[in-house]
């Protein structure tokens, strides 16, 4: 589509052509093609959509010539149409804006247009290539208009509904199905509601039916269970019509129909499955595509899976004949491979031999994809594991057990020989689901055979790399490490602890190989590079940063550095995550044209921007082009600016805000209330229909319970439920406003600890369905106590927090051994529960002095129950052991000191000897250091892990000591830059009153929110009102209640300004009276996309903008 400068030129051409036309207008009786006459009449009537369709149809079979512009203008002149350029432009834009923001009217237009125009519209939607209208000097990109229409909330729905209603009358069914498919995919399946399915034709041609069914299968995961059932009903209604079955005892389901149903086969009733002919099920399972289909039935239930397995076994396809497994292709049926996810429910284990059990286990690696029923899968794997190892040692069978090896206990893993682990490494390295304690044992076994960690060994270990000690990484050959870092290590970085990552990086940087400098450090590893080391690297350019993850402090430094040598903003803004480093001063320094031309880089990377950066963008846009400002940015300005939005602009405001993430855009609860108040005002406190649901988008998740409970009209409920199920975190009040099933779904999706009531409901449900008997009397004091079984622990997850301490203490030893890591991950355990689990660990593993590294690592939160004396008894000589303990954040100062001292004693290190990876591994236990110990840390080690230490929530006096060390690295606080302040994190909370007062106000937004929270109340109050006003929205939201209590009235006013997103000084605020309403002459940003409605306006203006000379 033509961009804004071209649009402006079109208006100029139109003015000129109008003036010239009045002097030399062709005879209106000259032949004008009937389609162009129709188009001109539609322009006169204000039916601009019809005019566009007439023009598209004309262009499909005619070439536009210069004289056609004259003839159209002559025709309009002959009709004595009184128009001016501005009035025509305004009328067109108003008409098209209405269709864009009130898509119901677009639906009415398309319903009323004649068959020929509707056919043209359908052909336009069907067009594959980037369609263009070439009007000589003007080229209109119809493909771009089409794409924007498909992505506009509500417009897509209108196009879908009218296609469903009229397309099959004017085009063949294959074409209509293709159009419906495109529209459905653009909606992510949101239109597939039961009432829509009832309107689908039931007399489609076979090929069209299969094509539409394929679309439904692709959208299966995006549709609700209710809608899936409606799709299934429509599909089976057609499939049953074509069935030849006359006897109710024989199913209508054939092999081909099962294939057509695809994943919808899981909705077949049990009784129907049991009637499927053995011949048909045999044909189906022998299809090449059957395996792929059965690999995707993630939501099948055990009952239905067993029914399918029974029918398969009744066919001529033998699942028990092991010769079919090993018969060479093509005759081989490879039954377990053919069964897909049905193999996860295979329970005919009687007389099964070890070979078949091993093959089954190999196929069951895919069972982790099932949605639910994992407890049964684990039990089946355990049974198969027993069969697979009958009459053979574990060493002999290890490589043939697939991912069932994750069910091996510590004692079984420890019994393995290094040779066996080495021989099975190609299997072990691909298995997912390992516990950290398991990979510690296995990696040690593997390296015991290999003796040294080399590049080859690293490439072989795969998932087991997480168990390699930090010290082993540091002992690697300097030539091997860079190669390993660029390949295998970078693929498994997420499994490495911060201490391991730092060990790798410190070795890399220590090697100092110019060919493998810092710029060569890949992806996620790069974010661990210190600001100190970045300052020493000369080889940075935007290109090398494209694939790297950056901390904000890194981005701030690198953007400032590269800005000195790169004068093209687009090159910097498009360089991966470098946009994180753009400051307000950078944004303010951009010219109007440059800002508008490059705004799309910011808009496309909003998820990387801080609330402060978004606030800066909003102010810049307001100041330079408020008429074209994306409405969602108004939410980043003071709340009063929302009042400037007139009712006529409510829809674009809701659409724009509904596409953003409100929680990251507005942090202050009061301001969020104001924003949502404006949303409710625009909605008139109701969601009237499905179009309103489309428009509000993500805002649906933030609507108050009163609207969800009473303001959603029945017509809007189906799409609203579809949207609400994807909300990441709903309040208890919101959950109470809609059905129980959705409540449960929302609770499961929540990223926070679920409510206790929900956990108790899950607990009771699992316990009531458990077939396990209480613990035996073998455990003293446990007679009749309902102790947890392995199945219970697995199913309950966080709901394990509902067990009584005595229940946990009565757990069977094997249950504890197999589930200790799951139990250690439960966030909701109280101290009495943790103490019970610690006692169980003592019963199973003996006293703490006998615990090995994998025991300690497996404890998780259970370790919090160890007292100071018990912690001192642990073997803490490995930094990896300590790193696992330091992941817990609830240690008392005494416990933390015991861990710290235990490491120093057991490793024979002094504080002066600590390396950077030791400091990272010690983590929160560093907070237990005193004022005489912290200065002993080597500056050369401290400076490369400042960012990690800056995440610790230490006491004020500890942070003050770390701040003193930071001064040695980064200089006096008065010399600190935004990148340094961001790098320091909580260490910056160690500043004195005097130092804090001396900080430049422009640095205030670059404190981390955690540092603001850590500032003592009596020091925070020393900030000037101007400094507080410059905190930015995110830091202002981090101010604690206790800090607020110490502020003066003037300081509180400044804090409120920061929360609102106001300028630092009242006089800097622009007036909020001039709202971001669109005027006919408003200019769109250069390089920014033009709305499809405006594009249509440009097109119609363009055809009359031909110069008459």
Image: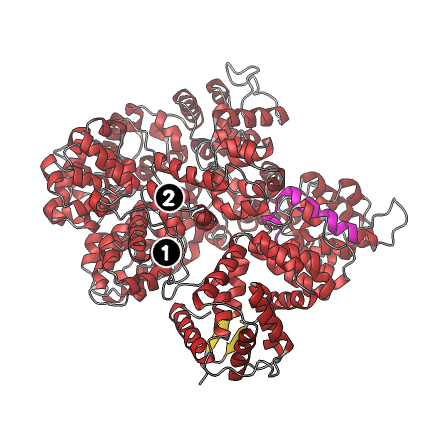
Residue 447 spot, x, y in % from top left: 38, 51
804 and 147: which is toward the camera: 147
Magenta stretch holds residue 545: no
Residue at x-position 49% and y-position 58%: 94
Left or right placement of residue 377 versus residue 523 in this view: right
Residue 963, by quadrant, is top left
Residue 897, by quadrant, is top left
Question: Which label's residue is closer to the chain start, 1 or 2?
Answer: 1
Q: Secondary structure at mark 1?
A: helix
Residue 366 spot, x, y in % from top left: 58, 49
The colour scheme of the drawn protein is: secondary structure
Residue 176 spot, x, y in % from top left: 68, 62
Q: Residues within 10 Å of mark 1 (few under 14, many from 20)?
A: many
| Contact between labelled residues 2 and 1, with CB atoms less than 8 Å apart | no
388 and 861: which is toward the camera: 861
Left or right placement of residue 33 versus residue 142 in this view: right
Residue at x-position 52% and y-position 18%: 779
Asked if residue 214 shows in the view, the reply is no
119 and 911: which is toward the camera: 119
Examine the residues drawn in magenta and state their main secondary structure.
helix
Image: 742 above or below 915:
above
Image: 715 above or below 506:
above
Name the residue tied to disc 1: 627
Residue 967, by quadrant, is top left
Name the residue tied to disc 2: 642
Magenta stretch holds residue 222: yes
Residue at x-position 47% and y-position 79%: 21
Q: Secondary structure at mark 2?
A: helix
Residue 813 spot, x, y in % from top left: 50, 27
Left or right placement of residue 748 versus residue 53 in this view: left
The residues colored magenta run 219-238
Rendered-image quadrant of the C terminus = bottom left
């Amino acid at each position: 589509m033509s961009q804004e400068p071209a649009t402006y030129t079109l208006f100029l051409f139109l003015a000129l052509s109008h003036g010239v036309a009045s002097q030399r207008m062709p005879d209106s009786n000259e032949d004008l093609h009937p389609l162009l006459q129709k188009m001109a009449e539609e322009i006169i009537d204000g039916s601009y959509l019809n005019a566009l369709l007439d023009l598209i149809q004309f262009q499909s079979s005619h070439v536009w010539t210069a004289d056609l512009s004259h003839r159209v203008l002559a025709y309009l002149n002959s009709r004595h149409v009184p128009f001016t350029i501005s009035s025509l432009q305004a009328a067109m834009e108003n008409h098209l804006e209405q269709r864009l923001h009130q898509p119901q009217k677009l639906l009415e237009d398309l319903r009323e247009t004649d068959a020929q125009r509707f056919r043209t519209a359908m052909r336009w939607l069907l067009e594959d290539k980037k369609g263009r209208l070439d009007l000589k000097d003007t080229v209109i990109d119809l493909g771009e208009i089409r794409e924007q229409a498909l992505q506009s909330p509500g417009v897509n729905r209108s196009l879908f509904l009218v296609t469903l209603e009229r397309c099959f009358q004017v085009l063949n069914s294959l074409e209509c199905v293709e159009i419906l498919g495109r529209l459905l995919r653009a909606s992510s399946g949101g239109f597939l509601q039961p009432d829509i399915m009832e309107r689908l034709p039931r007399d489609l041609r076979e090929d069209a039916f299969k094509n539409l069914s394929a679309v439904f299968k692709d959208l299966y995961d995006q549709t609700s269970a209710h809608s899936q059932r409606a799709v299934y009903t429509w599909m089976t209604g057609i499939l049953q019509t074509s069935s030849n079955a006359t006897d109710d005892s024989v199913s209508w389901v054939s092999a081909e129909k099962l294939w057509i149903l695809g994943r919808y086969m899981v909705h077949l009733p049990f009784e129907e499955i049991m009637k499927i002919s053995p011949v048909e099920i045999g044909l189906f399972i022998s299809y090449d595509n059957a395996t792929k289909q059965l690999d995707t039935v993630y939501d099948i239930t055990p009952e239905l899976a067993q029914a399918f397995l029974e029918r398969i076994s009744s066919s001529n396809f033998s699942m028990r004949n092991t010769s079919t497994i090993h018969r060479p292709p093509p005759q081989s049926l490879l039954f377990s491979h053919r069964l897909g996810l049905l193999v996860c429910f295979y329970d005919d284990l009687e007389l099964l031999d070890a070979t078949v059990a091993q093959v089954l286990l190999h196929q069951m690696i895919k069972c982790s994809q099932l949605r639910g029923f994992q407890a049964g899968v684990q039990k089946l794997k355990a049974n198969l594991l027993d069969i697979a190892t009958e009459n053979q040692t574990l060493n002999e069978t290890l490589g043939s057990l697939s991912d069932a090896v994750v069910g091996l206990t510590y004692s079984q893993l420890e019994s393995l020989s290094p040779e066996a682990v080495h021989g099975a490494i190609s299997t072990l390295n691909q298995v997912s689901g390992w516990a950290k304690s398991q990979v510690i044992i296995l990696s040690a076994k593997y390296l015991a055979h290999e003796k040294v960690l080399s590049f080859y060994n690293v490439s072989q270990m795969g998932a087991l790399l997480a168990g390699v000690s930090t010290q082993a990484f540091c002992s690697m050959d300097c030539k091997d490490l860079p190669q390993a870092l660029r390949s295998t290590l970078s693929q498994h970085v997420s499994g490495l602890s911060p201490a391991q990552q730092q060990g790798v990086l410190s070795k890399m940087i220590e090697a100092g190989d110019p060919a493998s400098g810092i710029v060569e450090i890949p992806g996620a590893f790069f974010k661990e590079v210190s600001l100190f080391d970045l300052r020493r690297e000369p080889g940075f350019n935007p290109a090398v940063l494209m694939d790297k993850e950056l901390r904000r402090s890194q981005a701030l430094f690198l953007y400032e550095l590269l800005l000195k040598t790169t004068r093209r903003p687009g090159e910097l803004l498009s360089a991966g995550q470098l946009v994180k480093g753009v400051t307000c001063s950078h944004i303010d320094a951009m010219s109007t044209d440059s800002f508008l031309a490059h705004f799309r880089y910011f808009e496309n990377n909003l998820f990387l921007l801080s609330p402060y950066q978004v606030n800066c963008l909003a102010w810049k846009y307001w100041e330079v082009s408020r008429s074209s400002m994306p409405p969602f940015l108004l939410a980043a300005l003071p709340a009063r600016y929302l009042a400037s939005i007139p009712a006529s602009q409510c829809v674009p405001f809701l659409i724009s805000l509904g596409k953003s993430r409100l929680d990251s855009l507005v942090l202050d609860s009061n301001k969020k209330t104001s924003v949502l108040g404006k949303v409710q005002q625009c909605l008139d406190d109701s969601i009237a229909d499905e179009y309103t649901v489309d428009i509000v988008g993500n805002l649906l998740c933030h609507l108050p319970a009163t609207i969800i409970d009473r303001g959603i009209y029945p017509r809007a409920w189906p799409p609203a439920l579809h949207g609400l199920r994807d909300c990441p975190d709903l309040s208890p009040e919101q959950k109470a406003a809609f059905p129980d099933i959705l409540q449960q779904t929302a609770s499961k999706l929540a990223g926070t600890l679920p409510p206790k009531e929900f956990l108790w409901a899950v607990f009771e449900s699992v316990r009531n369905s458990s077939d396990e008997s209480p613990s035996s009397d073998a455990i003293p004091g446990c007679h009749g106590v309902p102790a947890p079984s392995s199945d219970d622990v697995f199913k309950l997850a966080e709901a394990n927090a509902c067990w009584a301490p005595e229940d946990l203490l009565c757990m069977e030893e094997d249950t504890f051994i197999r589930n200790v890591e799951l139990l250690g991950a439960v966030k909701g355990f109280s101290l009495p529960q943790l103490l019970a689990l610690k006692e169980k660990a003592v019963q199973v593993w003996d006293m703490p002095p006998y615990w090995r590294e994998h025991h300690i690592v497996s404890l998780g939160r259970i370790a919090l129950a160890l007292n100071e004396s018990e912690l001192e008894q642990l073997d803490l000589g490995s930094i990896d052991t300590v790193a696992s303990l330091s992941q817990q954040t609830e240690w008392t100062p005494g416990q933390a000191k015991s861990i710290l001292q235990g490491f120093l004693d057991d490793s024979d290190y002094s504080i002066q000897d600590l390396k950077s990876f030791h400091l990272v591994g010690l983590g929160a236990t560093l907070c237990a250091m005193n004022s005489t110990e912290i200065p002993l840390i080597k500056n050369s080690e401290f400076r490369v892990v400042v960012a990690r230490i800056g995440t610790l929530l230490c006491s004020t006096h500890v942070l003050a000591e770390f701040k003193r060390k930071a001064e040695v690295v980064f200089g006096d606080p008065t010399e600190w830059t935004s990148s340094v302040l961001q790098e320091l994190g909580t260490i910056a909370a160690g500043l004195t009153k005097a130092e804090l007062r001396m900080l430049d106000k422009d640095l205030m937004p670059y404190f981390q929110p955690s540092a603001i929270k850590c500032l003592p109340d009596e020091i925070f109050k020393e900030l000037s009102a101007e400094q507080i006003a410059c905190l930015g929205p995110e830091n202002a939201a981090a101010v604690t209640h206790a800090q607020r209590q110490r502020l003066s009235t003037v300081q509180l006013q400044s804090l409120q300004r920061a929360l609102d997103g106001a300028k630092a000084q009242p006089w800097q605020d622009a007036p909020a009276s001039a709202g971001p309403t669109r005027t006919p002459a408003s200019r769109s940003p250069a390089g920014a996309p033009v709305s499809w409605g405006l594009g249509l306006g440009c097109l119609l203006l363009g055809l009359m903008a031909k110069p008459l000379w």
